[in-house]
Image (spheres, coloured by chain):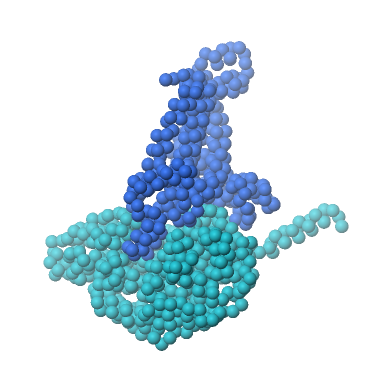
């Protein structure tokens, strides 16, 4: 097991460098610098432009900027936003709870519904339900998030008035951000009805963000279940006269969950990627919206370190999933 | 009293209390403020959250216009030579009291001095604390224009200029000229918390800063001591909503009372919705195609005139902006500004005449040109790719082959400044409502040298008229000079003027007291929902 973890850890180092190099160069490949973008249609005087670039430390050669960036990272310094001058780590930690809260709700929605739909579809293979679930999940997987979000808003929020259009809570509530998690902050506040309102605001964004993982989990669960249901030990369990529920949930699903677990780990990446669009549609003040804004404003430190932090998170989650997977399936950790 | 009756009464009283409780005005805006120290920034969204809300200036724009009215200066005098401006300050104005600052004195000349000297004087303690510099102050050349700023007494401040500059008064009404509390600055300086000026602002304006939740909302309380009177809304919430579709849905659902900048495509549907109303007006914007007069054969005026004749401007406006959402541009600045020359007739759409002019210029075999346009849309160009294709199609009819280059905005600005383009789709947003603010940056000879003038057009007569108008204090004389300048511009045709886009904000039908500003800033000091 130790060598398995060591091998995985060893892979983290090149991945980490790859991410820093990619983000550093990609954001600089986009034409236009922060000063030009900030001045917009007004354009900039060349001398003023040069002075502003100097002030921001962007007049140094690229290799030196990259070296400074790495050396700051090594000292745990993520730098300051070029626009707000706030510490990048502070901005990230302020916004990340919103993203995490949404991602967790979307994950719960996707996992519960996905597992259920996948199991039932597998048990009723070839039925109308099975075809329906597979058809819908394929559609869900192919759905452009932006379009899907707007459709849901038009129907549920504007036509039916059942859900709020966007935001984390009704704007008439003045909730002081203590933890950054609106569900918790609204509970801590004295404002009556704030918690239910915050929950209400989570419904549509969770559905939109959870749609793709839901489709993936449902399809994965179905195929894993179908495979497991054909195994001898399931047949034996059935022959022993165990109840169908016990056979399905204790014997079959537990083993079918192993590949699903890996998919769940991978979905963390897709949830964070999806958050960029979902947060934009639902005016959700999380890291996705923050990054989009930073890219359009060429806020280099925010883009570089924001993506690095998210990448680190995805790597860590996948690393943990790998280890869990190793525990769940001994064949993996013995592979060379 | 029966228990049930008591409960019913209590509930109805509670309900009545809730009904009468004043609510904040919720405005859905399109981006987060960059910060709150407006002197460091240029974006209109930042101005809405700071200069329009928290601060005042010596003079201000009358709501919804580009006319000047007294602000923190109740009156002012301009010397005969137009070089000395003396401002007499209003007495009894209080700075906002917040949980991070309790003012001990009223507004006076020290505050004005601090606000300008930190931008003007490179040795001022606060000068290099502004990490973004002072883009407006610097870009407008005020460093060179202002000779000195003096405190005459506690309630009088004098600005002496190096040359007469008529737009100076309007400059003083712009966001960067907002007046800060020198006492608060001293408090921050003592504590070594210079950066807090950008995060915890204090001004004299109609609203008091309450809280900014990053990328989500900015909350303000109404300032009960505002010298202009307490705002009718109990407070103001700027709800940051990036997507214009979502902003519209939010105002439809009643989550906001005002939503800024709906898409032109949505305007007809908004007009039909009985729950909504529109505020509309001509913005201080112009869209144009600049023709690089340094490139052959565009240095020949006949070619430039021919291109003006060959382009069907009305079809372009109808397609890109939508019927009624923009006005065809004739002159280099919008018709609401001083000295707009209404006698000039726009170039008609006349491909025949265009072909004749091209032939006369020896281009009967046709010519090849490149046009640069931006990749993403903006207020002066909602659909750059489509607009460029329309120009390409129209010019092809008169034998001009146009190669379209789509460039990202920052890159477009960089290349345009170097003069790499033949034709360039560009736009300009005015800041202070003075014609000079459109003409000098875009069409003067100095701007041609720096590359800001993207037609790279330098006409000595035109330039002399601009200089003369800038030096004059007489509005009617200035108007006359600008009218003459526009005739030269029209005949020499360095641009194809395209459109004066209109500005729209959408609000619930019960919203009152909103004045749409042509300056694209939004002030909610008099706005409330009934």
Residue that sits furthest to the right in the current view: B1
**Going 55% across and 59% down the picture, which residue do you hit?**
B193
Viewer-nearest residue: A100 or A209: A100
**Going 51% across and 47% down the picture, which residue do you hit?**
A89
Please tell me the colour of chain B.
cyan
Horizontal relation, residue B477 to residue B203: left or right: left
How many discs mark residues in the rendered view? 0
**Compared to A220, does A33 lie above or below?**
below
**Compared to B433, does A164 lie above or below?**
above
Q: Quadrant of the N terminus of chain B?
A: bottom right
When asked about the image quadrant of residue B477, the answer is bottom left
Residue B506 appears in the picture as rendered: no
When asked about the image quadrant of residue A66, the answer is top left
At which x and y percent is residue B28? Answer: 53, 59
Please tell me the colour of chain A.
blue
Q: Quadrant of the C terminus of chain B?
A: bottom right
At which x and y percent is residue B199? Answer: 54, 59
At which x and y percent is residue B254? Answer: 58, 57
Horizontal relation, residue A41 to residue B182: left or right: left
**Going 45% across and 39% down the picture, which residue do you hit?**
A311
Viewer-nearest residue: A251 or A230: A251
When asked about the image quadrant of residue B347, the answer is bottom left
Residue that sits furthest to the bottom in the current view: B80
At which x and y percent is residue B307? Answer: 23, 66
Viewer-nearest residue: B111 or B300: B111
Residue B164 appears in the picture as rendered: yes
**Compared to A14, does B251 lie above or below?**
below
């Amino acid at each position: 097991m130790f060598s398995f973890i060591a091998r995985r850890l060893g892979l983290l180092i090149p991945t980490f460098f790859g991410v820093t190099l990619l983000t550093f160069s990609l954001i600089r490949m986009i034409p236009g610098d922060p000063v030009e973008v900030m001045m917009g249609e007004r354009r900039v005087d060349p001398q003023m432009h040069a002075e502003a670039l100097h002030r921001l430390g962007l007049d140094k050669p690229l290799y030196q900027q990259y070296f400074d960036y790495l050396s700051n990272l090594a000292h745990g310094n993520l730098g300051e936003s070029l626009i707000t001058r706030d510490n990048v780590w502070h901005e990230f930690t302020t916004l990340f709870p919103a993203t995490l809260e949404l991602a967790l709700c979307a994950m719960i929605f996707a996992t519960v519904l996905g597992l259920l739909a996948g199991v039932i579809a597998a048990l009723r293979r070839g039925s109308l339900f099975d075809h329906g679930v597979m058809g819908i999940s394929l559609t869900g997987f192919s759905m452009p998030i932006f379009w899907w979000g707007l459709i849901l808003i038009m129907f549920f929020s504007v036509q039916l008035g059942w859900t709020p259009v966007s935001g984390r809570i009704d704007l008439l509530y003045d909730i002081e951000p203590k933890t950054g998690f609106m569900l918790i902050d609204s509970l801590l506040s004295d404002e009556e009805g704030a918690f239910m309102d915050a929950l209400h605001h989570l419904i549509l964004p969770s559905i939109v963000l959870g749609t793709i993982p839901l489709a993936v989990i449902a399809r994965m669960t179905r195929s894993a279940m179908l495979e497991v249901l054909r195994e001898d030990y399931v047949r034996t369990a059935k022959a022993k006269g165990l109840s169908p529920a016990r056979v399905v949930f204790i014997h079959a699903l537990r083993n079918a969950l192993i590949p699903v677990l890996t998919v769940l780990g991978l979905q963390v990446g897709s949830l964070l990627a999806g958050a960029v669009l979902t947060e934009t549609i639902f005016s959700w003040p999380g890291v996705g919206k923050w990054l989009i804004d930073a890219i359009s404003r060429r806020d280099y430190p925010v883009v570089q370190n924001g993506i690095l932090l998210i990448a680190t998170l995805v790597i860590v989650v996948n690393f943990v999933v790998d280890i869990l997977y190793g525990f769940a399936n001994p064949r993996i950790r013995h592979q060379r | 009293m029966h228990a049930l009756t008591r409960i019913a009464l209590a509930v109805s009283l509670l309900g009545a209390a809730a009904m009468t409780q004043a609510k904040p005005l919720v405005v859905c805006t399109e981006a987060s403020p960059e910060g709150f120290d407006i002197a460091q920034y240029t974006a209109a969204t930042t101005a809405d959250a700071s200069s329009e809300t928290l601060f005042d200036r010596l003079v201000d724009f009358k709501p919804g216009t580009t006319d000047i009215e007294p602000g923190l200066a109740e009156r002012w005098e301009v010397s005969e030579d137009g070089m000395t401006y003396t401002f007499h300050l209003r007495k009894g104005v209080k700075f906002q009291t917040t949980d991070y600052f309790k003012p001990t004195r009223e507004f006076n000349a020290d505050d004005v001095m601090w606000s300008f000297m930190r931008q003007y004087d490179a040795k001022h303690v606060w000068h290099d604390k502004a990490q973004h510099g002072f883009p407006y102050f610097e870009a407008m050349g005020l460093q060179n224009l202002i000779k000195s700023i003096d405190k005459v007494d506690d309630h009088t401040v004098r600005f002496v200029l190096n040359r007469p500059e008529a737009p100076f008064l309007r400059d003083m009404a712009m966001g960067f000229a907002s007046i800060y509390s020198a006492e608060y600055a001293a408090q921050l300086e003592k504590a070594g918390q210079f950066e807090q000026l950008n995060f915890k602002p204090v001004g004299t304006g109609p609203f008091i800063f309450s809280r900014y939740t990053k990328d989500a909302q900015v909350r303000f309380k109404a300032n009960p001591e505002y010298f202009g009177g307490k705002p009718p809304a109990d407070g103001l919430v700027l709800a940051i909503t990036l997507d214009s579709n979502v902003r519209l849905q939010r105002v439809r659902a009643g989550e906001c009372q005002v939503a800024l900048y709906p898409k032109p495509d949505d305007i007809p549907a908004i007009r039909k919705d009985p729950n909504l109303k529109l505020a509309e007006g001509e913005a201080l914007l112009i869209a144009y195609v600049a023709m690089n007069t340094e490139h052959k054969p565009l240095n020949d005026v006949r070619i430039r005139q021919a291109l003006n004749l060959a382009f069907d401007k009305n079809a372009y406006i109808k397609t890109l902006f939508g019927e009624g959402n923009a006005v065809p541009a004739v002159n280099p600045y919008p018709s609401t500004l001083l000295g707009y020359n209404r006698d000039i007739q726009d170039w008609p759409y006349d491909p025949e005449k265009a072909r004749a002019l091209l032939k006369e210029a020896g281009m009967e075999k046709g010519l090849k040109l490149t046009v640069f346009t931006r990749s993403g849309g903006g207020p002066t160009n909602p659909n750059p790719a489509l607009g460029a294709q329309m120009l390409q199609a129209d010019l092809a009819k008169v034998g001009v082959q146009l190669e379209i280059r789509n460039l990202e905005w920052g890159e477009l600005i960089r290349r345009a400044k170097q003069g790499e383009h033949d034709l360039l789709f560009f736009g300009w947003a005015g800041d202070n409502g003075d014609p000079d603010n459109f003409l000098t940056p875009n069409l003067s000879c100095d701007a041609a040298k720096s590359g800001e003038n993207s037609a790279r057009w330098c006409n000595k007569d035109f330039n002399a008229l601009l200089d003369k108008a800038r030096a004059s204090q007489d509005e009617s004389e200035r108007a006359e000079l600008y009218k003459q300048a526009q005739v030269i511009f029209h005949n020499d045709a360095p641009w194809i003027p395209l459109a004066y886009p209109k500005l729209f904000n959408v609000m619930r039908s019960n919203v009152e007291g909103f004045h749409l500003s042509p300056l694209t800033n939004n002030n909610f000091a008099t706005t409330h929902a009934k």
